[in-house]
Image (cartoon, rainbow, N blue to C red):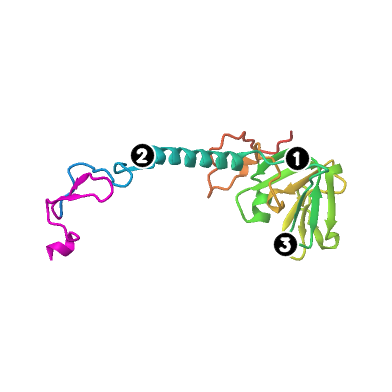
Amino acid sequence: MADRLTGGATPGKREHSKHSGQHCQQPPYGQHPPAPCEFAATGLTAGETLGVDLRSWLHVHMELSQAARRLRSVAVSAAPATPSPESPLQGGCLCGAVRYEVNAPSVVARYCHCTHCQRRTGTSSSANCLFPRASFQLLSGAEQLRAYKPPTGVPKLFCSTCGSALFSGDPFSDEQVVIRMGTFDADPGIRPQYRQFVGSAATWEPIPEDGLPRYPGSHST
């Protein structure tokens, strides 16, 4: 039984290597060798492979992995391209009937906490981008567009098929087109820069401490 467990070797017996003539002490069963013995064929010690130290290799591998993660992080956080005539930004409603595009950078982006935005979105605020009217083009869905004009404020344009909120004001005559940021197909290349109408902000969701300027009512840049 003992011979089978130890591969036929007698505990403590020194065996002669066929390749190098060196001896390697075989430890008793269940014990670790007191020191690494040399491999007969290569002369390498345990933990080494063809002259490469295993610990050094692992250290280099970890450094390369960390560098790769840093590069991926930089790529993800890099600023996206802004809309241009060569690379316009498109967007649309939920059902796809209304489609539009802009071909110039946004003038400004903002959060609005007014009660109108709360009611039309069902959320505590609305994120909007303002673009020069000359950069805006409606690609399809003019017949689906409807507008609601509240007693105060500007018209709110939406798709009559799916109900998606799309624009504020008149995108065909106003100096600037106000577009709901959630309708863009891709990153518009800008982030909200301030919060307006915080005087009527929803009480059930505290405004985050994001460092953005806050204005109690309307604010224009």
Residue 25 at x, y percent in the picture: 17, 47
User: In this rendering, which labeled residue sits more in front, label 3 or label 1?
Assistant: 1
Quote the CA–CA distance across marks 3 and 1. 25 Å
Residue tagged 3: 163
Q: Earlier in the sequence, mark 2 or mark 1?
A: 2
Q: Nearer the viewer, residue 199 or 55?
A: 55
CA gap between label 2 and label 1 equals 53 Å
Question: Closer to us: mark 2 or mark 3?
Answer: 2
The residue where tag 1 is placed is 106
Residue at figure coordinates x 77%, y 39% from the top left? 105
Residue range highlighted in magenta: 1-29
Query: Which of marks 3 and 2 precedes in the sequence?
Result: 2
Mark 1, Cα crowd under 10 Å, few <14 / some 14-19 / many 20+, is many
What predominant SS class does the magenta segment belong to? Answer: loop
Q: Position of residue 82 (x, y in %)?
A: 74, 40
Report which residue position mark 2 lands on. 55
The quadrant of the picture occupied by the N terminus is bottom left
Helix or strand or loop: what does disc 1 sit on? Answer: loop
Label 2 environment density (alpha carbons within 10 Å; few <14, some 14–19, many ≥20): few
Residue 92 in sight: yes
Which quarter of the image is occupied by the C terminus?
top right
Q: Are discs 3 and 1 less than 8 Å apart at CB?
A: no
